[in-house]
Amino acid sequence: MKKAFTLILLFFCFCNIGYSQGKFVIQNKKGSDKIRFKLINNLIVIPVEINGVELSFLLDTGVSKPIIFNFLNVSDTLKIKDAKKIYLRGLGEGESVEALKSKNNVFKVGDAIKLNQDLYAVYDANLNFAPRLGVPVHGILGFDLFKDFVVEINYSHKYIKITDPDKNRYKPCKKCERFNLEFYNNKPYINAKVKINNKQIPVKLLIDSGGSDALWLFEDEALGITSSNRYFDDFLGHGLSGSVYGKRSKIDEFSLNSFVLKRANVAYPDSTSILFAKKISGRNGSLAGNILKRFNIVLNYQEATVTLHKNGYFNDKFSYNKSGIELAHDGVRFVKERENIAPNKNSLINETNQNQTRIVFDSRYKFSLKPAYAIVELRTGSPAHLAGLKNGDIILSVNSKPAHQFTLQQIMQIFYAEDGKKIKLKIDRNGVVLNYSFILKDFFK
């Protein structure tokens, strides 16, 4: 099973956006369509076509309007027009960021099309998902799709099904539970319970499919929402307005009626990073991908309901990155690889007796460009930090296997392994090759 990885979590707020700006329409007789997605680090990546250009977007219940990361230089290709400069504010300690609002864009998701979609182009290079996900991600799509359809998110089979509400038929399910949703600024909230220090506490949580963590809670001593003595400080992600830091810990229990998850992961973001988010009346945090993926979900915004059915991920143990290392793609490297062919007798050429110059072309080897993985975050006091690793180190091999033979997610999975596992890394630090090893330790054991 794939583990959950700490990754970027964005939160955008757009107020007073209604249903009157047109809608998506499914262009087939069935009135429904299935769209396959990639599940990467608990995040849903779907194909989206904008103005005839095929792109990849995160499907995020926590955003109100589509965002495109314009530093990827796709605006000219998309022929964005009627742009107007605005400023957006979100999670993080920094200032608002500049964006261009564009009208009348054509969006296509599967068989669904919308002819007059607003789009927000953000130029901040920090909002680049691709290096940490290992796949291209050009933007984020949320409310505009969910408001027009009944949307089934099938995490176990990795597809979403969009259905015209007029053609949707609710099918009773003995093992399912249906919950009412509340909406603030076009974002869905659900009521749940957490058990902290043996105290059961009701909480209102944003349903945030664009976050890869399990659960974020806003500390509130009056309600009893506080971290236990067992926690560590960590980088939680990068929001629209800057980096977000906080505490990582465990809670005794998380429950949605009969669905109960023991010892769930929790993060408590610093209060300075969530001032804007806490303005939502009664909000206590976010419910994110590492819990959501344990259910197959049907979201019906028009009826303000969500139906949950637990799937094969439900009983997965809540793990976390025990190494303290966060990796990202960092360009490419030339790698020498041996080919499985016989030596070429003609591989020695240009040999003279006069100067004994000898140029060797050995056809058994080839040089290829392979992805490079760099350490971009290193938790203070973690096993990797104590071993001597540093930000900027390029990983050359993991447990004696060349790093380029792994995907980014495969390397990160290794860092989520069981307590006591030994990790050996060969790294390149400013041209010097060094070897390090450390033992994974479960902080909460």
Image (tube, rainbow, N blue to C red):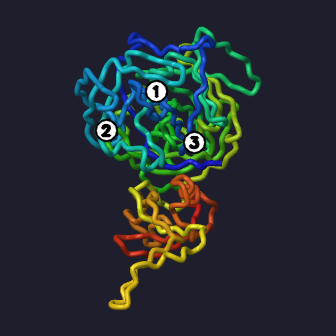
Tag 1 secondary structure:
loop
**Which residue does the numbered mark 3 point to in the structure image?**
290
The percent coordinates of residue 399 (x first, y second) are 57, 69
Q: Nearer the viewer, residue 140 or 211?
A: 140
Q: Would you call the spot at circle 3 few (<14 residues within 10 Å), some (14-19), or many (20 or more)?
A: many
The disc placed on residue 73 is 2
Q: Do the residues labelled 1 and 2 touch (CB within 8 Å)?
A: no
Residue at point 43%, 72% (across, down): 388
Q: Do the residues labelled 3 and 1 touch (CB within 8 Å)?
A: no
Q: Which residue lies furthest to the right in this view?
A: 174
Q: Which of 402 and 237 is in front in this view?
A: 402
Q: Which of 399 and 228 is in front in this view?
A: 399
Q: Which of 332 and 212 is in front in this view?
A: 332
Tag 2 secondary structure:
loop
The percent coordinates of residue 224 (x first, y second) are 51, 40
**In which quadrant of the rendered image does the C terminus lie?**
bottom right
Q: In this view, does 290 lie to the left or right of 82?
A: right
Q: What residue type is labelled 1?
A: Gly
Residue at point 63%, 13% (across, down): 30
The disc placed on residue 354 is none
Q: Is residue 125 above or below residue 427?
A: above
Please tell me whether mark 3 or mark 1 is closer to you in this view: 1
Q: Which amino acid does label 3 sit on?
A: Asn
Whole-number angstrom distance, CA of label 3 to CA of label 1? 18 Å
